[in-house]
Image (tube, rainbow, N blue to C red):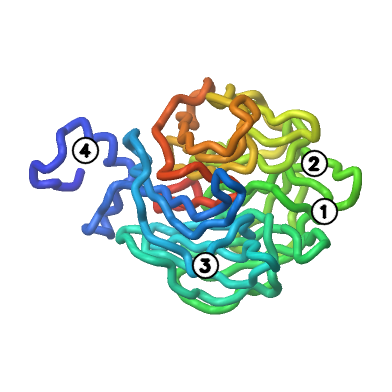
């Protein structure tokens, strides 16, 4: 147990103990970072929010990205850095940026994607971050790219998804990343229930894992070290509030976890090793882009609970954290 010099109560120390790393004496509580997106009026923005995942309450301002943008290629984090790539600002963007999670401030340049891409997804281990699929100016892509999070530089080719798709969502463990859902760019825009997985340490093509309970685009994914959960999405007719989960180390179809506090699509997902947090998105219940933050305890099936609010309503955003299922 770390020594907090009496600053935090014993209860709070207990809550944070599972996330403390003896190799990091400058410990801060686990943060979730929410990157920009589209505001309630439908315009792209550049503000970044953050929360402390182990508490509840409203998000605070972190800083800004380089420009207003939405529909990212994906975002992911290590224990020290949050990385986001691509997006849409009139044209697809190839820029990768990063923030130092323990501080606040504006994003800095990391490198470039192989090509300008938006509407993909991202997830990582402590050392390697992956971008999955998306759309590059009219055509979906099945390309998976990766970066080494602690460095800077351009992304490299990792392999391919089982099918080209946009608006999927990704999360996983220290060894595997799962990508679920998504849609085609071709009319009539079929949605997918496909879950793929990759082994993070080895480049190569994705392998079939199983299926979500619904074929949806734009769910949000969270994970512990053992479970991955997918919340919400759009099935072509309805925005849903279902949460599915799988055991990350296995293969097979998803099982029902519970329900979100309201229907949601195009929201964000982030987590620590025990709690999954969903934020923002479009809710059909209010017929609006929302600022709602909600959470689940990943080990226990059940419905989501209220966490707080973002600094402003947003959708088509991306999120990461400093302590998630991909970090040992």
Residue 1: x and y, percent? 20, 43
| Dot 3 or dot 1, earlier in sequence | 3
Camera-nearest label, 4 or 2: 2
Disc tally is 4
Residue 55: x and y, percent? 32, 35
The residue furthest right is: 187
Residue drawn at 63 percent across, 30 percent down: 287
Give the SS element for disc 4: helix
| Dot 3 or dot 4, earlier in sequence | 4
- Mark 3–mark 4 distance (CA, rounded to whole Å): 38 Å
Residue drawn at 49 percent across, 46 percent down: 325
Q: Which residue position is annotated with label 1? A: 163
Q: Are marks 2 and 3 in contact (CB under 8 Å)?
A: no
Mark number, residue 192: 2
Q: Which residue position is annotated with label 3? A: 67
Q: Nearer the viewer, residue 9 or 34?
A: 34
Q: Nearer the viewer, residue 35 or 80?
A: 35
Camera-nearest label, 3 or 4: 3
Q: Are marks 1 and 2 in contact (CB under 8 Å)?
A: yes
Q: Tell me: residue 298, above or below residue 188.
A: above
Residue drawn at 83 percent across, 49 percent down: 184
| Dot 1 or dot 4, earlier in sequence | 4
Give the SS element for disc 2: loop
Q: Is residue 250 visible?
A: yes
Q: Which residue position is annotated with label 4? A: 13
Q: Nearer the viewer, residue 159 or 91?
A: 91
For the residue carrying disc 3, how many other residues have a C-alpha within 10 Å: few (<14), some (14-19), or many (20+)? few
Dividing the picture into quarters, in which one does residue 58 lie? top left
On the rendered structure, is 265 left or right of 59?
A: right
């Amino acid at each position: 147990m770390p020594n907090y010099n009496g600053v935090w109560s014993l209860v709070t120390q207990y809550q944070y103990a599972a996330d403390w790393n003896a190799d990091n004496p400058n410990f801060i509580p686990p943060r979730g970072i929410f990157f920009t997106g589209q505001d309630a009026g439908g315009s792209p923005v550049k503000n970044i929010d953050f929360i402390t995942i182990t508490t509840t309450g409203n998000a605070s301002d972190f800083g800004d990205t380089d420009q207003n943008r939405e529909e990212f290629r994906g975002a992911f984090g290590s224990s020290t850095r949050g990385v986001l790539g691509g997006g849409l600002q009139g044209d697809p963007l190839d820029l990768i940026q990063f923030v130092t999670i323990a501080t606040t401030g504006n994003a800095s340049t990391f490198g470039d994607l192989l090509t300008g891409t938006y509407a993909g997804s991202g997830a990582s281990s402590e050392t390697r971050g992956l971008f999955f699929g998306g759309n590059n100016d009219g055509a979906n892509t099945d390309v998976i790219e990766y970066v080494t999070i602690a460095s800077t530089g351009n992304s490299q080719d990792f392999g391919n998804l089982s099918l080209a798709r946009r608006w999927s969502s990704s999360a996983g463990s220290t060894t595997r990343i799962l990508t679920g859902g998504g849609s085609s760019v071709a009319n009539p825009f079929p949605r997918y229930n496909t879950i793929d997985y990759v082994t993070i340490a080895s480049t190569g093509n994705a392998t079939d894992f199983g299926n979500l309970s619904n074929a949806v685009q734009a769910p949000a994914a969270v994970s512990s070290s053992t479970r991955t959960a997918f919340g919400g999405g759009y099935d072509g007719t309805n925005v849903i509030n279902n949460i599915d989960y799988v055991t990350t180390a296995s293969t097979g179809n998803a099982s029902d976890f519970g329900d979100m506090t309201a229907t949601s699509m195009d929201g964000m997902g982030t987590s620590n090793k025990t709690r999954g947090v969903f934020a923002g998105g479009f809710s059909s219940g209010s017929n609006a882009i929302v600022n709602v933050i909600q959470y689940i305890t990943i080990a226990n099936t059940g419905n989501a609970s209220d966490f707080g609010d973002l600094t402003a309503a947003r959708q088509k955003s991306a999120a990461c954290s400093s302590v998630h299922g991909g970090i040992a």
